[in-house]
Image (spheres, rainbow, N blue to C red):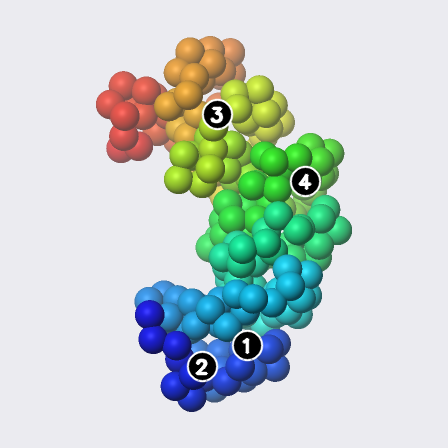
Amino acid sequence: MPNLIEQGVIAAATPASIRATLQRSAPRTVAEWRELRRAWSHALRSHPAHDVIRLATALVDDGFWGRVTAYELVADHPGARTALTPASIRRLGRGLADWASVDTFACCLAGPAWRDGRLPTRQIHAWLRSKNRWERRAAVVCTVALNVRARGGRGDAARTLDVCRRVVTDSDDMVVKALSWALRSLVAWDREAVMSFLAAHEHALPGRVKREVGTKLRTGRKN
């Protein structure tokens, strides 16, 4: 990968320079943005983990590109993700307000931290009780890191289904979609547990969840 910083295409990786680059020439595509983010990650590779977390925290209020840049800078740093604390995760999650940011936050930061014991279950439960739909979605999507192999998941039916039970009657579309994703992700590890969950909550579960999870069980696909 070409080092865009060494080439002078973008400035050094500091909150001010990253913010200026994203504001001056906002990426038109994810591919454009990811090239920038990888260059910043390269520049930050040898920086202390806590410095990277502080930098990321300074970016989360700078619009969509600033927020997802913050999350991926932490996730891609050799030590930053494992240096996260409950307090730093809450700071990074402040102001969540869109689908892509929520899923990046939950899949890359909060979910792995919960899986590995660095984020307590009580924080997941607190988000589930929130009036904010995005916090509730984030809590459900955190289960993806428990079960998707590509995210480091090793299967965790107990924690996954505990979260799912708490949102069975949540009718918000963003939460319903997350519930479907959570259950489908668990199928690879414990089909019987998922089937039992569907049966136990048949009359309360949204039709979308029953349809998508049922198809996953039968065919291995969502649709």
**Which residue is disc 1 drawn over?**
13
Q: Nearer the viewer, residue 181 or 130?
A: 181
| Quadrant holding the N terminus | bottom left
**Which residue is disc 4 drawn over?**
118
Residue 199 screen position, x and y as percent: 45, 11
Mark 3 Cα shell of 10 Å, populated few (<14), some (14-19), many (≥20): many
Tell me the amino acid under the disc marked 2: Ile
Side (left or right) of 17 relative to 54: left
**Which residue is disc 2 drawn over?**
5
Q: Secondary structure at mark 3?
A: loop
Residue 63 screen position, x and y as percent: 55, 70
Q: Nearer the viewer, residue 163 or 43?
A: 43
Tell me the amino acid under the disc marked 1: Ala
> Mark 1 or 4 closer to N-term?
1
- In the rendered view, would you say 121 is above or below 91? above
At 47% across and 14% down in the image, what residue appears?
193
- In the rendered view, would you say 211 is above or below 60? above
